[in-house]
Image (cartoon, grey):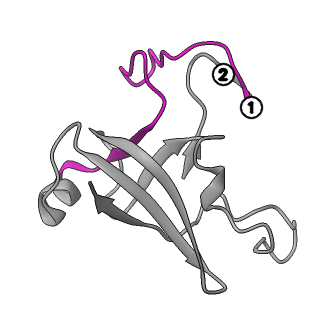
Amino acid sequence: MTIRSHDQFNTTIYGLDDRYRGVYNARRVVFMNIDDMKAIGVNKLDIVDITSTYDSIVRTAHNFKIVPYNIPSGNLASYFPETNVLIPYNHFADKSKTPISKSVKVRLVKK
């Protein structure tokens, strides 16, 4: 899922701190369940690329730090617009036509 930080209004970013989630001076972070971290062998602050593949096109958001967070297993969260590159423009909800931003299948590639 994509989320906003504390110092952000829509796509306008006013600062690099997110006091809601304890992140300071950074935005290229990916929030991850601790059990999922253990399962794939990554640690806090490891650097990963996040990729998605739709219509045979691989999209990559580079150099994100892993941040353990109380998030449901099997899910990730990152700030937008930094992760907008992962969203295919031509995939959207049938009725509302909103982008699939909240349900993008991704992979992490450890650097």
**Residue in front for this viewpoint, 44 or 94:** 44
Secondary structure predominantly adopted by residues drawn in magenta: loop
Span colored in magenta: 10-34
- The correct choice, above or below, for 86 with respect to 95 in the image is above
Q: Which mark is residue 8?
A: 2
Could you say which quadrant of the image residue 29 lies in?
A: top left
Point out the image quarter for the C terminus: bottom left
- The correct choice, above or below, for 79 with respect to 99 in the image is above
Q: Which residue is mark 1?
A: 11
Judging from the image, what secondary structure is the residue with disc 2 in?
strand
**What x and y, as percent, mark residue 56?**
61, 86
**What x and y, as percent, mark residue 27?**
48, 29
Image side of residue 88 versus residue 38, left or right: right
| Residue at (66% x, 51% y) in the render | 84
Judging from the image, what secondary structure is the residue with disc 1 in?
loop
Kindly identify the amino acid type of the residue bearing the numbered disc 1: Thr
Kindly identify the amino acid type of the residue bearing the numbered disc 2: Gln
**What x and y, as percent, mark residue 103?**
58, 65
**Residue in front for this viewpoint, 18 or 58:** 58
Q: How many marks?
A: 2
| Residue at (40% x, 45% y) in the render | 63
- Magenta run includes residue 41: no
